[in-house]
Amino acid sequence: MSKIVNVFLYLLLVIVFVISCTKDVSQETGQLPGIPNSSSVSCKSCNFYPWCQESSYTYIDSTSFGKDTLNYYYQFLYDTTINGVIYTSTLLNFQDTVFHNCDNYITTLLIPSAPHFLENHTILKSALSTGATWENTFPANQVINNIQYKILTKSTTRKVAATNFIDVMSVQENAFFDTSLITSSTVYYARGVGEIERITKSKTAESLARKYITSYNIP
């Protein structure tokens, strides 16, 4: 599957995340459950979406076209203030820069979508209760111009790649172009780890992709 399709299946929340990287994830075992962040590192207080310097993740993206290995690596560049909010400028996979903020357990990414323009993606509000909703709109986007979110479950367990993750929350992401539903995803986040699984379906509930974590290293 092309990187554009991978990004699309990520529901444009992490538009520049789905980029293959030539650097392999390195950790002691190379297997789950990986290495969680230490309690001494705040990682921007993203309890269900850690954002830490030199973190690395490996996922398998399984679709009807086959399986692809996705490697992510975070390299912090600098902090900057945009519209009165402090963001961490982060180089992903040594290629693309995004701006990250996680004040009040709300994960927001500013993603360059055109020269001198940053698209705002509020991708997780982990402090909200089950049933809570929010949305992002992208008026200039010609593929998806609205994403609606809903917290489905909290404080559950989820088995991924033979590993049981505890304290997991799930979020529904419905992507629209105008009023037409394009895709619907269920995303699972584990406390202290981040996204562990993403299941994407078409508007007719046809299975499109399953992305799941295989290893990670959070310093």
Image: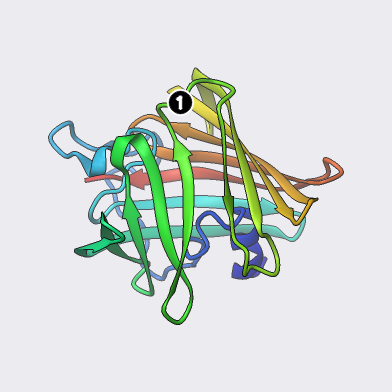
> Is residue 19 placed above or below 12 in the rendered structure?
below
Quarter where residue 40 is shown: top left
Q: Residue at x 34, y 61 (%)?
A: 99
According to the image, label 1 marks what residue? 128
Residue at the limit of the structure toward the left, as seen here: 40
Residue 209 in the image, given as x and y percentages of width and height: 69, 49
Quarter where residue 171 is shown: top right
| Direction from residue 5 to residue 33 in the image, left or right | left
| Direction from residue 12 to residue 49 in the image, left or right | left
Residue at the limit of the structure toward the bottom, as seen here: 115
Residue in the foreground of this view, choosing between 175 and 39 = 175
Q: Residue at x 42, y 31 (%)?
A: 126
> Is residue 2 placed above or below 195 in the rendered structure?
below
Q: How is the image coloured?
A: rainbow
Q: Residues within 10 Å of mark 1 (few under 14, many from 20)?
A: some
> Is residue 98 placed above or below 152 in the rendered structure?
below
| Direction from residue 218 to residue 97 in the image, left or right | right
> Is residue 66 placed above or below 203 in the rendered structure?
below
